Image: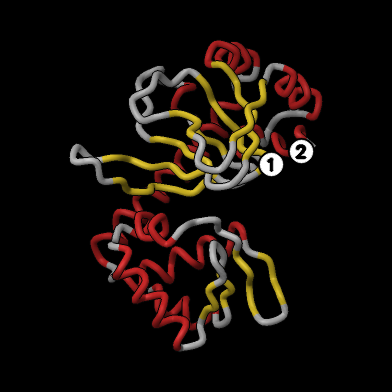
Amino acid sequence: MEVNVIAQVPLFAGLSEEDQIALRSMMGVVALRRGEVLFHEGDEGKRFYILMEGKLKLGHSSADGRENLLAIIGPGEVLGELSLFDLGARSTTATAISPSKLLYLEHADMVNFLEEHPGMAMHMLRALAIRLRRTNETLADLVFSDVPGRVAKALLDLAERFGARVEDGIHVPHDLTQEELAKLVGASRETVNKSLAEFVSRNWIRLEGRAVTLLDVERLKRRAR
């Protein structure tokens, strides 16, 4: 199963099964409880991680202590990939929002592996470009979209990555508190709650604690535009 996780990571898409097994043998494992921090913003970046189980949030804190969430990471995704190229300080804080299990690889081991598999560099650049594109889209949304539109888009993104089809819609166990969801869309909790209440009243969604069921995906898509 762990090798299958490696095979699903875009960075390692070009590796043979033998190379994937060799790479897995070089990796360690770390487990986190909900709320436990994997690394803090400003820590030295020496490891690259693959999330096998659970979900993590990546956050950035301002000088006055406010936090914005930059991304939610799910199984098969990577974090700390910049440490493969730059051993500088971490630019975010990574915190588990559900019980999580990760594989990790030390910087020196990854550099040695890259030297033996130079073709993998192209896959790395492609994965980094995807992450950069997402960041650019998020910045554009903050400028051009209103809060209800950003909430609708966030729910759709979470549904695409973590949702499962049920009888009346798409069930999304996102594991976020309303405060965390507000930080993810860059708005106040009160404004986000108002948007969620509006979606509920229109029968577009059903709230279920740290989960939501999308009842009318098409209307949410139109609202997210």
- Where on the picture, by quarter, is residue 83? top left
Taking depth in this image into account, of 143 and 179 the one nearest to the observer is 179
Image coordinates of residue 107 in percent, x first then y, are 53, 16
Indicate left or right for 71 with 49 as reference. left
Quickly name the residue at label 2: 4
Question: Which numbered marker is on residue 83?
Answer: none
- The colour scheme used here is secondary structure
Q: Of the residues shown, which amino acid type is indicated by label 1?
A: Gln
- State the residue lying farthest toward the bottom: 202
Taking depth in this image into account, of 154 and 202 the one nearest to the observer is 202
Indicate left or right for 40 with 32 as reference. left
Image coordinates of residue 74 in percent, x first then y, are 58, 47
Q: Residue at x 64, y 29 (%)?
A: 103
Quickly name the residue at label 1: 8
- Number of numbered callouts drawn: 2
Looking at the image, residue 138 lies above or below residue 27: below
Q: Residue at x 55, y 14 (%)?
A: 111
Give the quadrant of the C terminus: bottom left
Q: Are marks 2 and 1 in contact (CB under 8 Å)?
A: yes
Q: Residue at x 50, y 31 (%)?
A: 38
Q: Of the residues shown, which amino acid type is indicated by label 2?
A: Asn
- Where on the picture, by quarter, is residue 41? top left
Q: Secondary structure at mark 2?
A: helix
